[in-house]
Structure formats: C-alpha cells, structure tokens
Amino acid sequence: MIFTHDTEHALGTVVDLVNSSPAASGAEGLGDLIALRAFVERNRFSDVPEPTDGDLARVRALRTGFQAVFDAGDVPTAVDLINGIVGGVRTTPHLTDHDGYDWHVHFFAPGAPVAEHLAADGGMALAYVVASGELDRLRTCEAPDCARVLVDLSRNRCRRYCDSRTCGNRMHVAAYRARQREAAPG
C-alpha cells in the first residue's frame, strides 16, 4: 500500500467520478439523481444526506476539476487546481473508525453534502499524491481509443491501462497479432 487506506479509497472514488463523464465513457454516467445515488453507494460514502439536483450539478462541476488535475502537465498546475478544489469547501478534519476500518482521517464535515464530501476527501487525496512526489501516478489510459483515467498504485509504476481485462487485454492481443503478421512469411 503506497498511501493509507482512506487515501487510496478517495483516489478510487475520484477515478470513478472522472470516468463517469461522457468524454471518458461515451455516455453520461451521472445523468440523474438515481445515477448519483448509485455512485454514492458504490463508493461507500458515509454520513451524506440524500442527494439533490443541486448536488448533481456540483458533483458534475467537481468532476471537471478533478479531470483537470489528471490533465495537468506539471506540479505547479496540479497544485493550483487542487488548492482551488479544497479551498472551495469547508474542511473539518476528524478521526473516525467506521465500517471495520482502523482510525483514519475524514476531511469533510459530518453530514456534508456529497459534493463537499468529494471535494474535501478527493482533493486531499490528490494533495497527498502531489506532496509525496507521485503526480506521475495520475494517468490517462494508454489505449488509443480510451480516455478513462487511472491511479497507478503498482509498486513499479507499470500500470498503463484503465482495466487490464478490457483495454489492457485488447492492446496486448493487438500487439501479439502485429508481431504474428510481421513474422509471417511474405
């Protein structure tokens, strides 16, 4: 584990959010409140009130901000973007030990709306990535027809694809077939 459990969980949630965009997935993954509720449940949010239409709009705007961090070409740009995200919400750091996890820090105020929860925890997780000199772990899938993002948490920083079963497998098969064609007699 490179980062603490809660940081890795928040990074995974940020990736899920960014990958819900039409640009990444080909369709709007947060098209309505039902989809937002499913996102909240899938990512095991704790202590958030029932989402509203306003929350949906704020989460979509936040998604754009998180995407910009993945697209940042350098640390100063990423820092400015992250500071803008966490600076736009009230943070209330507190220790908690819910759902069978040991003590960890939440940065959102208890009962905060889903967008504040995301901005505080996701923004701080991205801040930890940058502060530890690991910005290069924030990537876009290397498959030519994929715009999904990923956080490379592998020890040797070798993850190239958003999903090894889809993009990774497809690219490996294409490379294998290309080698076969090159090796085939004329």
Image (tube, rainbow, N blue to C red):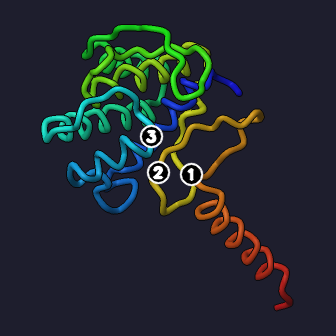
Viewer-nearest residue: 173 or 47: 47
The image shows residue 101 at horizontal and vertical percentages of 60, 24
User: Could you tell whether 112 is left or right of 182 in the image?
Assistant: left
Q: Is residue 47 above or below residue 17?
A: above
Disc 2 packing (10 Å; few <14; some 14–19; many ≥20)? many
| Residue assigned mark 2 | 148
Give the left or right position of residue 144, taking residue 60 as reference.
right
Give the CA separation, mark 2 to mark 1.
6 Å
Q: Which mark is residue 136?
A: none
Q: Quadrant of the N terminus?
A: top right
- Does the residue at mark 2 contact the one at mark 1 (Cβ under 8 Å)? yes
The crowd level at tag 3 (other Cα within 10 Å; few <14, some 14-19, many 20+) is: some
Q: Please give the residue where the numbered disc 3 appears in the rendered image.
A: 43
Q: Which sits earlier in the primary sequence, circle 3 or circle 1? A: 3
Q: Secondary structure at mark 1?
A: loop
Distance between mark 3 and mark 2 Cα atoms: 17 Å
For marks 2 and 1 on the same chain, the one whose residue lies earlier in the sequence: 2
The earlier-in-sequence mark between 3 and 2 is 3
Q: Circle 1 sits on which residue?
A: 162
Instruction: Tell me the quarter of the picture where residue 177 sits.
Output: bottom right
Q: Label 3's element?
A: loop
- Going by the numbered disc 1, the residue's amino acid type is Cys
